[in-house]
Image (cartoon, rainbow, N blue to C red):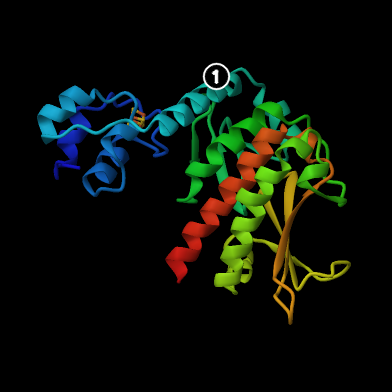
């Protein structure tokens, strides 16, 4: 990939709308990230790649999955823009701050403006954008019950359960097997809570990726003759906040985020 080293040259090619679809707060931030190699030019859907090609001497292919993600974000943003934010704040466990909606995810503040643009102090937030916007659009409100269910027992969960086990629980189990302090680290990084009573697991951690949608991670260490085990549980009210596909995307997206964190800390 050939890239220019001058952020202003990249900036000149951008529409300067600061729309956030590249998951950065502004076009200038995108230009700076592009020259550092932290973003591909193709991550801005509005950049004319043919023009960029002349300029930087090489064209990048747009990733079809990334384009689909950006389209999904754009669709959700249109729905968010139609919402009454005062009603939404109450329904979602958020707050109104200067006409934006503030929602906590994993202990960090996320701001969603009137156009559905998401910004956060959390630099790993790209994977949370779609679940967060889906929650704003889909959630019917209601408080967590404190009753935990496996994925397969959630509404419509049975059909996707084998895939969820493979991509979500098995992936996270392998990660915790390799990085034994990972769950403790997640408690520190993401304001998690350690559950001590009522669970037979060696460690049980509750995280709040969305204010009213907690996830419980229970891990059993390997013992003589027995492999380790890990299960993810959801509050029984979860289906009132997100459809099963969004719950799947949220949990599997978190596992991918934890993989990145584990790599950074190892
Ligand atoms: S997606 Fe493109 S137009 Fe939107 S903020 Fe990023 S660089 Fe600017």
Mark 1, Cα crowd under 10 Å, few <14 / some 14-19 / many 20+, is few
User: Could you tell me residue 210's position as x and y percent?
Assistant: 67, 44
How many numbered marks does the figure carry?
1
Whether residue 170 is situated above or below residue 41 in the rendered picture = below
| Res. 6 image quadrant | top left
Report the residue at 83% width, 40% height from top: 237
Of residue 183 and residue 210, the one placed in the foreground of this image is 183
Q: Does any portion of residue 20 appear in the rendered image?
A: no
The residue that disc 1 covers is 78
| Res. 220 image quadrant | bottom right
User: Could you tell me residue 216's position as x and y percent?
Assistant: 74, 56
Ligand 1 lies in which image quarter? top left
Report the residue at 58% width, 30% height from top: 99
Whether residue 224 is situated above or below residue 114 in the rendered picture = below
| Res. 183 image quadrant | bottom right
Of residue 7 and residue 41, the one placed in the foreground of this image is 41
Instruction: Please identify the quadrant where the C terminus is shown.
Output: bottom left
């Amino acid at each position: 990939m050939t890239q220019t080293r001058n952020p202003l040259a990249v900036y000149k090619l951008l529409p300067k709308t600061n729309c956030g679809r590249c998951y950065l707060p502004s076009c200038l931030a995108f230009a700076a990230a592009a020259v550092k190699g932290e973003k591909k030019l193709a991550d801005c859907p509005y950049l004319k790649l043919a023009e960029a090609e002349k300029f930087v001497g090489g064209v990048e292919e747009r990733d079809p999955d990334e384009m689909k993600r950006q389209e999904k974000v754009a669709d959700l943003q249109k729905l968010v823009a139609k919402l009454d934010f005062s009603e939404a704040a109450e329904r979602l466990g958020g707050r109104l701050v200067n006409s934006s909606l503030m929602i906590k995810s994993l202990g960090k503040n996320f701001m969603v403006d009137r156009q559905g643009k998401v910004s956060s102090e959390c630099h790993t937030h790209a994977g949370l954008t779609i679940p967060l916007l889906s929650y704003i659009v889909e959630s019917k409100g209601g408080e967590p019950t404190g009753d935990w269910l496996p994925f397969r027992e959630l509404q419509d969960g049975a059909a996707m359960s084998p895939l969820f086990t493979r991509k979500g629980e098995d992936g996270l189990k392998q990660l915790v097997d390799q990085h034994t302090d990972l769950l403790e680290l997640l408690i520190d990084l993401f304001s998690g809570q350690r559950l001590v009573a009522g669970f037979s697991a060696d460690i049980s951690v509750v995280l709040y990726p969305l204010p009213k949608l907690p996830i419980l991670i229970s891990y059993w260490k390997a013992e003589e003759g027995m492999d380790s085990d890990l299960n993810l549980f959801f509050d029984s009210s979860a289906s009132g906040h997100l459809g099963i596909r969004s719950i799947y995307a949220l949990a599997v997206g978190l596992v991918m985020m934890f993989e990145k964190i584990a790599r950074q800390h190892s």
